[in-house]
Image: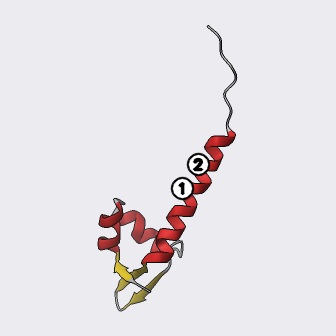
């Protein structure tokens, strides 16, 4: 398992620090608190974000536009 700090993880993935921090605090992302710092389990967090992307892509493909003729 590889762990990363919130700031490093957020910067490497192009995410906002505050978003990643909040997700760690509420248990959305797999993280452990060591002292006063959260360490994110990188593979688990990446898996979570990839699953969210796949879910959103499936929702978009379900929406069908009617044929429009002008």
Which quadrant is the C terminus positioned in? top right
Where is residue 51, by image quadrant?
bottom right
Q: At 43% across and 76% down in the image, what residue appears? A: 42
Compared with 40, 9 (above or below) is above
Q: At 35% across and 92% down in the image, what residue appears? A: 35
Element assignment for label 2: helix
Question: Counting other residues with Cα less than 10 Å from the Cα at mark 2, is it few (<14), some (14-19), or many (20 or more)?
Answer: few
15 sits left or right of 49 in the view: left
The span from disc 1 to disc 2 (Cα, nearest Å) is 6 Å
43 sits left or right of 3 in the view: right
Q: Badge 2 is on which residue?
A: 57
Residue 16: image location, x then y, percent: 35, 60
Which quadrant is the N terminus positioned in? bottom left
Nearer the observer, 25 or 59 = 59
Colour option used: secondary structure
5 sits left or right of 30 in the view: left
User: Looking at the image, how many numbered discs can be counted on the residues?
Assistant: 2
Q: At 66% across and 27% down in the image, what residue appears? A: 65
Q: Badge 1 is on which residue?
A: 53
Compared with 54, 36 (above or below) is below
Residue 28: image location, x then y, percent: 54, 71
Residue 34: image location, x then y, percent: 38, 91
């Amino acid at each position: 398992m590889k762990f990363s700090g919130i700031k490093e993880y957020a910067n490497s993935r192009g995410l906002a620090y505050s978003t990643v921090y909040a997700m760690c605090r509420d248990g959305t992302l797999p993280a452990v608190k060591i002292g006063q710092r959260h360490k994110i389990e990188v593979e688990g967090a990446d898996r979570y974000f990839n699953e969210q992307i796949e879910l959103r892509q499936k929702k978009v493909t379900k929406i069908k536009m009617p044929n429009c003729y002008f």
